[in-house]
Amino acid sequence: MGIFLQPSSTQVHRAEALTRKFGLRTEPKFLTLTVAIVASLVLTGCSVGPKYNRAPVETPAAYKELDGWKVAQPQDTSLRGKWWEIFGDSQLNALEDQVNVSNQNIAAAAANFLSARALVKEARSQLFPTVTVGPAISVSRPSANLGSNGATAAATGTPIVSTGKGTFEDYTLPFDASYQVDLWGRIRSQVKANIYAAQASAADLENVRLTAQAEVAVDYFEIRAQDAQKELLDETVKAYENSLDLTKARFETGIDNEESVAQAETQLDTAKAQDTNLGILRAQYEHAIALLVGKPASSFSIPEQPLNANPPSIPVGVPSELLERRPDIAAGERSMAQANAEIGVARAAYFPTLTLSASAGLESSAISTLFTWPSRFFSVGPQLSETLFDGGLRRATMQQYRATYEQMIATYRQDVLTAFQQVEDNLASLRILSQEIHEQDTAVMAAQRYLTIATDRYRLGLDPYLDVITAQTALFGNQQTEVNLKMQQMTSSVQLIEALGGGWDASQLPSAASMITKP
């Protein structure tokens, strides 16, 4: 059963014009071939793939946590480029610059993008003919028991002339060309799918980069908080040493008893142990940063510097901007476009395939006559094929790609909802921490006043040393809480910037043209 494409009168006229313009032969068989080629080129513009439209998502008009509280002034613009510079810390800037160069997760994601871009070129290569050449030389001796028919050439069917020594020689220089006409846009849909996949890979690369940059900033402020805790404990140890000296002096003069000395010694030794223990967590954060910047932990160190920074004003913008500013959302949207294009690839399988093929070359039984005019041979013609029965394979494939597309839509919408949640979480954290730190400052001042009073009353012999210990413990606890709150404030600022997409936006995705032209 065959399928015949009847050329239109316009296509016939175009074919005749081409034959006259290029001096081609006008016999019916050659004219029919030219008509088939012209018709295929005309039909190449067809496409059976569905049109892509980004799935709609619900976006609120503004962030709830900004109601009555602003992180940045409305006239501030969005973050751009090196977002970490907003913190004004030169040490952090230097570390972040190393992340872009030496982080191995970023290097792996970059290689993955290059691989995806190469797949675009692989798919696009199918839009062009394939031309091969296969020169060959064969020497054979047929069996004497085959009779006198001799051998025939495989390519042309012409008898091979004997050399007179019982052997036969065959010299061939064939050129073959084949071209599958993209009648229904299958190849073009595959190229689009690969372009969208490469763009999704580029967005994944930026998401890996942003994640690494944010982790470095968070770990950096954690280290600075540990340094602040160390400074606090060092001062506390000195204060406890002074208190121990006081209790010893009062004991030696008979004013106080040995119990107070033991209490002061216990308190001092506990503080020293806590002071030493801080080194474990700091070392772990330092090693984590070394990994993120691509350095061996053994040869990497960060000098001590207590946390002394205030959270910057962060331009937040409106929720709808997250669809363009978050690389993970951009990757989800491009994956959705890829799944839609792959539906077109599956749908094209329902239509016939037209292949144009040609073969030409030289063949001779002697090398001396290989490059003469009589040695030429050629064959050319189109081939049309259509699958009549496949046991439901094409239908199942269509169902698979449609289900994948629906999955990508759901994933994309979930990513958007997650992004809104993360921004609201960090806005709430910054808002509440700002109020809590103000209240904690008041608590520290009250604890300091309490310690002063308790110490004075102990010096006067009015109260036991246990009251001083209680006051010292209260002050130390409140000071530790204050350091932790300030650390949380800085890390929440970093996480808010990460939730907003850093300094990236979807306009930085590589274009379809760059996927093809760049080496």
Image (spheres, rainbow, N blue to C red):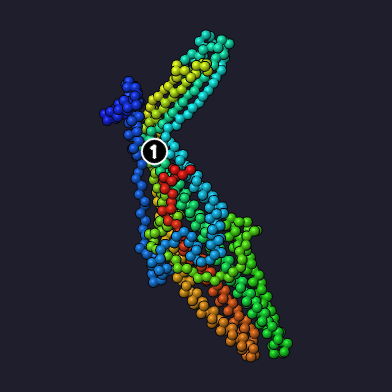
As rendered, which of 516 and 489 lies closer to the eye? 516
Asked whether residue 141 is in view, the answer is yes
Residue 251 x, y percent position in the rendering: 71, 87
**Residue lying furthest left:** 9
Q: Which residue shows up at 54% across the image and 82% down it?
A: 446
**Residue lying furthest top:** 148
Rendering quarter of residue 289: bottom right
Residue 352 in the image: above or below residue 226 = above
Residue 200 in the image: above or below residue 131 = below
Residue 232 x, y percent position in the rendering: 60, 74
Q: Which residue shows up at 40% across the image and 32% down it?
A: 180
As rendered, which of 513 and 398 lies closer to the eye? 513
Residue 177 in the image: above or below residue 45 = above
Residue 374 x, y percent position in the rendering: 45, 16
Badge 1 crowding class, 10 Å Cα cut-off, few under 14, some 14 to 19, many 20 or more, is: many
Question: What's under tag 1, amino acid-wise?
Answer: Arg
Rendering quarter of residue 162: top right
Asked whether residue 394 is in view, the answer is no
Q: Is residue 274 left or right of residue 342?
A: right
Q: Which residue shows up at 66% across the image and 81% down it?
A: 242
Residue indicated by mark 1: 186
Q: Secondary structure at mark 1?
A: helix
Q: Is residue 10 left or right of residue 369?
A: left
Q: Which residue shows up at 61% across the image and 68% down it?
A: 304
Q: How many marks?
A: 1
Residue 261 x, y percent position in the rendering: 69, 82
Quarter of the N terminus within the rendering:
top left
